[in-house]
Amino acid sequence: MTLRRLVLWRHGETDYNATGRMQGQLDSMLTQVGRNQARFAVPVLARFAPDVVVSSDLRRATDTATVFTTATGVPLRIDKRLRETNLGIWQGLTSADVDEQWPGSRRLWQTDPTWSPPGGESRVEVAARAYEVVADLDQAAAEMETTLVCAHGGLITALTGHLLELPVTAWAKLGGIGNCHWTVLERRTTSGLAWRLIEYNAGITG
């Protein structure tokens, strides 16, 4: 048996999100809004009946995941390979700061998954390490059918492009992921176990 469904869930709002700063792998904290977003999402995500939750080790993801696992009793695993993109020396800066000091570079980063910020990593590199987690889940799929992955917007977008086997040049066509929104991918055994996109950036608004 192979893993049949992946639900990729972005963490709730953080103090960095609220102030417009680029987080990368800085360990920012959820705001009260972010915690509430996670609580509101639990009943919807529980309908997917995940067998396990696997979370990034960054606090904003583990705290979001813990809201779900505490409410549902689903086991939680932590995996540092699910960390957000390392943004190098951009981490902690605002978009305006980056645009002022590196004109045009942020746009290049947004549109070219092979490009990395100074001292950071590319989206292609992020997708490769995230895919290792999926491959490991496949090895254990006799014990599980659905996995809820709690991670980060950049990683979710990159992993989605990789799993759908999209050309790297097309990854930028996938929009961003809102706080506490999720993406769902499923496999069909009749289509060579290829992943297909069921939902993208779904979530609760209001």
Image (cartoon, rainbow, N blue to C red):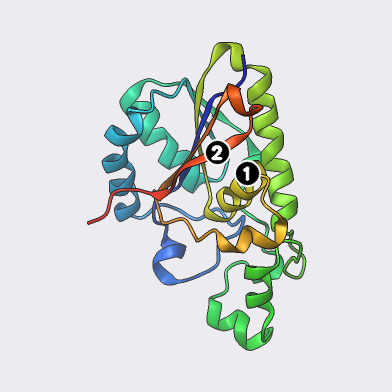
Query: Looking at this rendering, what residue extends furthest in the top direction?
Result: 142
The image quadrant where one finds the N terminus is: top right
Q: Residue at x 53, y 76 (%)?
A: 94
Q: Residue at x 63, y 33 (%)?
A: 194
Q: Pointer 2: residues within 10 angstroms few (<14), some, or many (20+)?
A: some
Residue to which mark 1 is pinned = 164
Q: Residue at x 62, y 46 (%)?
A: 159
Label 2 vs 1, first from the N-terminus: 1
Residue to which mark 2 is pinned = 196
Where is residue 39 shown, x and y percent of the image? Answer: 29, 40
Q: Pointer 1: residues within 10 angstroms few (<14), some, or many (20+)?
A: some
Viewer-nearest residue: 108 or 96: 108
Left or right: 24, with 72 as reference point: right
- Residue 42, by quadrant, is top left
Is residue 123 placed above or below 75 in the rendered structure?
Answer: below
Whether tag 2 and tag 1 are in contact, CB under 8 A, the answer is yes
Viewer-nearest residue: 140 or 85: 140
Where is residue 9 shown, x and y percent of the image? Answer: 46, 42
Distance Cα–Cα, label 2 vs label 1: 6 Å
Is residue 4 placed above or below 9 in the rendered structure?
Answer: above
Is residue 174 placed above or below 197 in the rendered structure?
Answer: below
Which residue type does callout 1 highlight?
Leu
Which residue type does callout 2 highlight?
Arg
- Residue 41, by quadrant, is top left
